[in-house]
Amino acid sequence: MKKIWIAIVKLFGWKFDLPPADDWKRLHRCVLIEAPHTSIYDFLLGAACVWRLGLNGKFFIKKEFFVFPLRKFLHWSGALPIDRGNPNNNMVGNAVKALAENNDISFIITPEGTRKCVKRFKRGFYEIATQANVPVAITYINYKTRHMGVGPLIDPTGDFDADMRRILDFYTDVTPRNAKGWNINLLKRTYNQENK
């Protein structure tokens, strides 16, 4: 099924940009951030990319989606239910624990937390990577070039704003599916202003 989906995505003209061998090894235990996230198509294309990389990818999704007939598919694709309305859902702690117990698991996070335009990324992905001592892998889906893949891997320095500026610099030329849901200049201004 996964190979079929990868083949379908390729048939529609999408290309996979694969990372260097050393980075590929590190991807098997990391936090992958997927941005810009402006459309449900990002999930469908992102799944093909993760499967093409051969990763044991896990991602959190609202527990409300775990109903028939989606439940089985979501479990199969790596989804983990989470109560988004509960501030004590311990998403970070659960991910850190899973990374500590497994040498072949990667968590996929959409740091915007929504498909709407935001001025800052949520910190959860960074806290997971920092506490688990794993890299943050920058992934992308560029609708203009029809390329997707993995950019640089960043080891968190502890300076969230500085690391965010490095991450956002990479996304400067990435075109989302829905332009209204992504404003790279607004994001950059947020992290530049907070350091003045």
Image (cartoon, grey):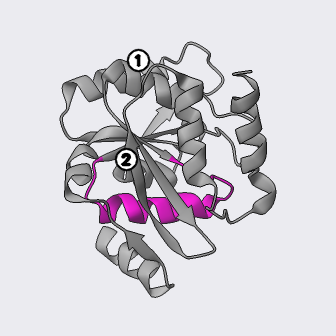
For disc 2, the neighbor class at 10 Å (few under 14, some 14 to 19, many from 20) is some
Between marks 2 and 1, how big is the CA–CA gap? 18 Å
Compare residues 141 and 76 and report the one nearer the observer. Answer: 141
**Is 48 within the magenta?**
yes
Is residue 118 in sight in this rendering?
no
Residue shown at 28% from the left, 29% from the top: 99
Q: Is residue 187 above or below residue 131?
A: below
| Mark drawn on residue 182 | none
The quadrant in which the N terminus is found is: bottom left
The percent position of residue 123, horizontal first and vertical second, equals 57, 26
Q: Which quadrant of the figure has residue 155? A: top left
Q: Quadrant of the C terminus?
A: top right
- Report the front residue among 150 and 168: 168
Write the start and end of the magenta stretch as one range.
34-56
Residue named by callout 2? 78
According to the picture, the residue beneath numbered tag 1 turns out to be 93
Task: Kindly state the secondary structure of the residue where label 1 is placed.
Answer: helix
Q: Residue at x 20, y 49 (%)?
A: 25
Q: Secondary structure at mark 2?
A: loop
Residue visible at 28% across and 52% down in the picture: 55
**Residue 95 percent location from the top left of the image:** 38, 27
Give the left or right position of residue 41, taking residue 103 as reference. Answer: right
Q: Is residue 89 left or right of residue 22?
A: right
User: In the rendered structure, which amino acid carries the disc numbered 2?
Assistant: Gly
